[in-house]
Image: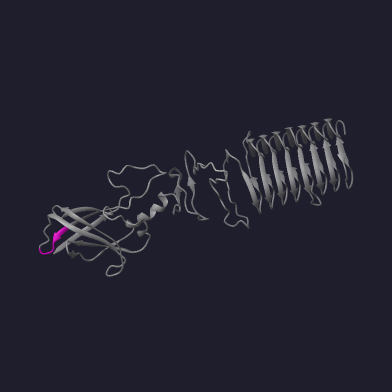
Amino acid sequence: MWYGVLWLCIVSQISGTPALSPGTRSVPNLINYSGFLTNSSDTTPVNGNLTMTFSLWSEATGGTQYWSETHSNVPVVDGYFHVVLGSVNPLPANLFNGRKLYLQIQVGSEILSPRKHLVSVGHAFHSLRADTATYASLDTLQADTRYLRKDRPDTTEITSSSGPGIYIHRSGNSSSDVIGLKVRATNPSGSAYAGYFEGDVKVEGGLSIGTVNGDGIVVDSAKGTSVNGILVKYAGDDGFQVNHTGGDGVYVSYAGYYGFHVNHASDNGVSVDNAGRNGFYVNYAGSNGVAVDAAQGDGLEVGHAGDHGLLIYRADSGGIYIGKVNNGSGIVVDSAKGPDSDGATVTYAERNGIHIHRTGSDGIYVGIAGSDGVRVDNAGDQGVEIANSGRNGVLIQHAGVNGIHVYSANANGVSIDSTNGTGFKVDRAGKRGLSVQQADSGG
């Protein structure tokens, strides 16, 4: 008869097994098991080579057997022995999933009693789900591990003193879309954000906003003296595109430098297809409200806006600046149908309200505006300036009130230097085609 004083130890890596990189590591299905075996008659330690069978059961007595294996010629020295469970018959990975497990040991033909209840250490095998990166069942996560947590909507903060909090390397070269990271709002029909960033955000690839019920992009504050609200350096297609939003297409509350700046776009500088409110709204910019240096298509394009197509509330330099547009128009607003909605509005600009340097088509085109086609309330220099346009300088097809309205400009109210078509054309206006209330130079 045998009497055993037994214990077990779970380890994540067996001695002699090389460590693996984070992308390839796995949890070995092995358990280190050590024990102390004595004679039941006089409790003297046992010596010799013995056959031992280990098995896992659902209950302390009886029940269902889940796994077993037999070790032959196990060395027992002064009562001590050691085996590696799973080395003969691998332990199933899904065995340790939170269920109760009891280990039974048989020495020779004798079954030792009672069975040993496995507790939390054995269930550490459940972490296999995290190491294989299918998902991680964690409530908190340190960024340096570079593993993602499960999709719980209300937990987990990732902090890192250096390097990325989450790093995703986009792979795949097929023609279909490869998504590095997809974030879905917990309540997309309400006010929840799919993504919210309190610090700087840098996107090295493209950024596309599909359909949202709120605002497409919101920048609350970018207060550095040379910090843009949104900056697009180079885009192979549109610099920035918003398909459909229930609120503003783009909203910048405060920017120390440009509210929105596009260096170069192979198509449109900024494109907003449909916005429930303003297509583009910049509350304050330390320099230009919106600047598009170069675009092959239109500089700024708004398909439909429930309120203003473009609204620049205050800019310490130019309200809207369009540099060079090779093929399209500087500003295009197809429709801003609200009863008080302007196609493009600049409330205050230290310099030019709207400046279009060069376009391949119209300098400014407004299809339908519920109020003014283009409105500049106060400009430190020109109200509206079109330096060179391939077609019309300004074309307003339909405006509910004025085609162009400039309330105050320290230089010219409207200045059009060179066009290949009509300098200024308003097809239909509910009040005046052009209204300039005060200009310190030419009206």
Task: Residue 361: give x, y in percent of width and height.
Answer: 79, 35
Is 25 one of the magenta-colored residues? no
Task: Residue 434: give x, y in percent of width and height.
Answer: 88, 40
Residue furthest front in the image: 175
Q: Is residue 233 left or right of residue 406?
A: left
Q: Nearer the viewer, residue 54 or 209?
A: 54
Q: Is residue 171 left or right of residue 214?
A: left
Is 40 one of the magenta-colored residues? yes
Q: Residue at x 39, y 42 (%)?
A: 21
Q: Is residue 441 left or right of residue 73?
A: right
Q: Which residues are magenta?
A: 37-41
Q: Residue at x 42, y 44 (%)?
A: 23
Q: Residue at x 69, y 48 (%)?
A: 248
Q: Quadrant of the N terminus?
A: bottom left
Magenta portion: prevailing SS class = strand
Q: Quadrant of the C terminus?
A: top right
Task: Residue 87: give x, y in percent of width and height.
Answer: 27, 52
Residue 317: image quadrant is top right
Q: Is residue 260 visible?
A: yes
Task: Residue 388: give x, y in percent of width and height.
Answer: 80, 30
Q: Is residue 352 visible?
A: no
